Amino acid sequence: MTGSESTVDAVIVGAGFAGLYQLHRFRELGLTCRVFEKASGVGGTWYWNRYPGARCDVESMSYSYSFSPELEQEWTWTEKYATQPEILRYLEHVADRFDLRKDITFDTSVISAIWDDETTRWTVTTDRGETVTSRYVVMATGCLSVPKDPEVPAIDRFQGTIYRTADWPHEGVDFTGRRVGVIGTGSSGIQSIPIIAGQAADTTVFQRTPNFSMPAGNRPLTEQEIAGMKADYRRWRDLQRTSGFGVPVEPATRSALEVTEEERNATYRNAWDTGTLVAILTAYTDSITDKAANDTAAEFVRARIREIVEDPETAEALCPSTYPIGTKRPCLDTGYYSTFNKENVHLVDLRATPIIEFTEAGIRTTDKVYELDSIVFATGFDAMTGALAAIDIRGRGGVTLTDRWSEGPRSYLGIAVAGFPNLFTITGPSSPSVLSNMAVSIEQHVDFVTDAVAHLRDGGYAAINPTVEAEDEWLAHVEEVGNFTLYPVADSWYVGANVPGKPRVFMAYIGGVGSYRERCDRIAANGYEGFQLIRPEREATK
Ligand code: NA7
């Protein structure tokens, strides 16, 4: 395809959960589409993150598409929390079932997207030299798709093997007999460490910030559970869509501070035993808004860590204490804390002894050299904006998205950016996405975008673009709601704190998936309030 040029109605960037569904919906509208995907297959996150133990920590029957009742009935999940291979098989099945692959070009990255105000078209260029002109561009590039390495000197000097959880070898890795170091204790580290430690001769975990983790209680689904859910999917989907996090929960009615310690701990114990992320964070009305209330949940989890981990010094180092529980993404694990009871597993607290550099033989901290055969980077992502910043996106007047976002991402609803007409960001910054069940948020965004495009077509409009005022109002609302909670205080990837130099902005909407959906529906029903609808040749604007 090198050097070729073509025209379609829409270019979609990415063939993960979002890109696949967007392609399906646009095709239903009769649009011609091209999807470009960097990987050699569909799946996005679930294509790349093949590290041992990789699972979704939203329950499998909820973390799935709802748009096709037939798909819901024919696909059967096997475990409470699906593994990466199972989710990838599901997405491959979706691609085949809806005949999506024929419009997807694999092994191809989009490198630029340039808007032309005269033609009201985007010109999209790929790293294989192909140029496509389209009316619409949808960035289905994912929130956690640009991995970042640890910021330590001399990584290249290390003579052993380096693996990245976010780009794991397809053939897998056998750590038997090896001395392995793992850097990073987010979800990827916490899921993989027990399995790596089960194989390796010796495992050293380099921890900068301890994380709150709860037992996943993963298990095979029973036939009754599967049949029950399949019979009840429609009601369940409605509950998901109107919930706070895209996962139905009983709303709390009381403050954590108005009940006795005994009652509170019984509630937390029940929440802990559910093996879900949300139960402990939604147990009380003020769990995530009041520091004293939050402390009670944090202390409950710390007590469990001290119970499980036998060495008191290691237990203390594993106890998070520098941020409220929930304000950095908590984890679900299978045997994470007990892994530190093994003799051949060691914890290095990087707050006490930071890494100085990599050496030929391993890692040098301020007090010691750790000799290693392999090092695993589980060091996270340039979240929310990384994948968009990697593409040279230029809107009206040649303004780049990177310049427009130099002080932090600006967006209306997390879907569209003033000055960048007909460009849509699925689960973009300031949407509820990363604080929700992604499957629910992705479907809602794709549906909104598809309806907007149908509205343009039916009304004879050439383009849609949010106004700066609508963007300002939305961002003020996102900030106001965020500030009502404890989220902005933590040095998390939600605020960009994990990437040196990134502007500190709380990039998620915590107003709830349900109320966000209502707002989007209202905006659409009111003729796309806050958006400018542009007629061909700008003959009229609204
Ligand atoms: P996360 O959650 O961002 O975790 C990355 C981890 O790597 C975290 O513990 C970081 O510590 C650590 N890290 C990052 N850079 C360094 C350096 N330079 N030195 C030492 N340690 C470092 O990424 P995951 O892949 O685990 O999970 C991503 C999401 O996937 C997760 O939130 C779920 O939504 C699913 P830090 O906390 O920054 O001090």
Image (cartoon, rainbow, N blue to C red):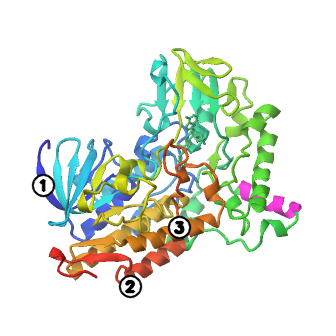
Q: Residue 410 lies in what quarter of the image?
A: bottom left
Image location of residue 173, percent across then percent down? 48, 28
Residue stretch rendered in magenta on the structure: 261-273
Q: Which residue is mark 3?
A: 478
Separation (CA) of disc 1 from disc 3: 39 Å
Q: Report the residue at 14% width, 44% height from top.
A: 1
Q: Which of the two discs, 1 and 3, labels the residue nearer the N terminus? A: 1
Q: Which residue is mark 1?
A: 6
Asked if ligand 1 lies within 8 A of label 3, the reply is no
Separation (CA) of disc 3 from disc 2: 21 Å
Disc 3 residue type?
A: Val
Q: Which residue is mark 2?
A: 526
Nearer the observer, 57 or 507:
507
Q: Is label 3 in a helix, a strand or a loop? A: helix
Up the image or down, 391 lies above or below 541; here it is: above
User: Which mark's residue is nearer the viewer, 2 or 1?
Assistant: 2
- Neighbor class of circle 3 (other Cα within 10 Å; few <14, some 14-19, many 20+) is many
Separation (CA) of disc 2 from disc 1: 35 Å
